[in-house]
Amino acid sequence: MHKIVIIGNLGRDPEMRYTPSGQGVTSFSVASNRRYRTADGEQREETMWFNVNAWGRQAEICNQYLTRGSQVYVEGTLTTRIFTGNDGQPRVSNDVRMTEMQMIGSRGGGMEDDRAPYGGDMGRGGMEDYNSPGGYGGGGMAGERSMSGGFGNQSDDIDDLPF
C-alpha cells in the first residue's frame, strides 16, 4: 500500500461533475511548498502541484466548502502520469485519489484560530501547549475537522502514543 499526505493551498476552485452512474467526483489542484537551504547557504523554495480527485460524499463536501486559496490537509494514493504537452515536451502529472481531507484554514484562507495545523498552539510554545486540550499531545489535527474522524480525540493521553 502507498499513501501520500499533502498540506497545501488550493490553486483553483473545485469542479464537481458526475459519472454516468451518478457518482459525484470533485477535482481541484493543491500546491505544496518546500523551503530549504542549499549547501551554499542560499534559501530556495519549491512548489509541487497535485491534481486531487474526491469521490462520493467527500466530493460534495469539497465542492461545498473549499475555494481557491483554502489551506487543506489531504491524504490519498498517488499516481504519476507522464504525457506529452501541446508543445511536444514531456510533462509529469501528480494525481491523488483522496481518501481523507481536513480543512485547516478558515474560509478567508488564514488559520481558523491560533492553533498550528496539527492542533498545536502557535502562540506560546511552552509545555502548557503540549498538555493543553487541542495542544500537541491533546489529540487531533486542526481541531478534529477530519472527514473520517480517525486522528484521535481530546481524551487521548500522551502515554498512549506508540513512540
Image (tube, rainbow, N blue to C red):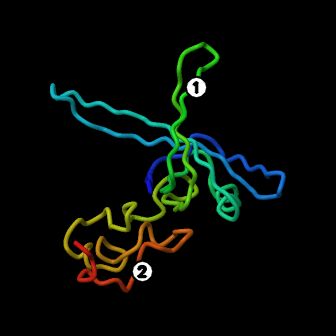
What residue would you read off at disc 1?
83
Q: Position of residue 16 (x, y in %)?
A: 74, 50
Picture layout, residue 10 above or below residue 48? below
Which residue is located at x 62 percent, y 45 percent? 28
Secondary structure at badge 1 equals: strand
Secondary structure at badge 2 equals: loop
Q: Identity of the amino acid at label 2?
A: Asn
Residue 153 shows which numbered tag? 2
Give the position of the C terminus as an image quadrant: bottom left
Specify few, some or many for label 2: CA neighbours under 10 Å numbering under 14, 14-19, or 20 or more. Answer: some
- Would you say 67 lies left or right of 153 here? right
Picture layout, residue 21 above or below residue 130? above
Q: Residue furthest front?
A: 1
Which residue is located at x 71 percent, y 53 percent? 25
Q: Residue furthest top?
A: 87
Which residue is located at x 45 percent, y 71 percent? 143
Which numbered disc flags the more N-terminal residue, 1 or 2?
Answer: 1
Q: Position of residue 52 (x, y in %)?
A: 58, 47
Q: Identity of the amino acid at label 1?
A: Phe
Specify few, some or many for label 1: CA neighbours under 10 Å numbering under 14, 14-19, or 20 or more. Answer: few
Q: Residue furthest left?
A: 40
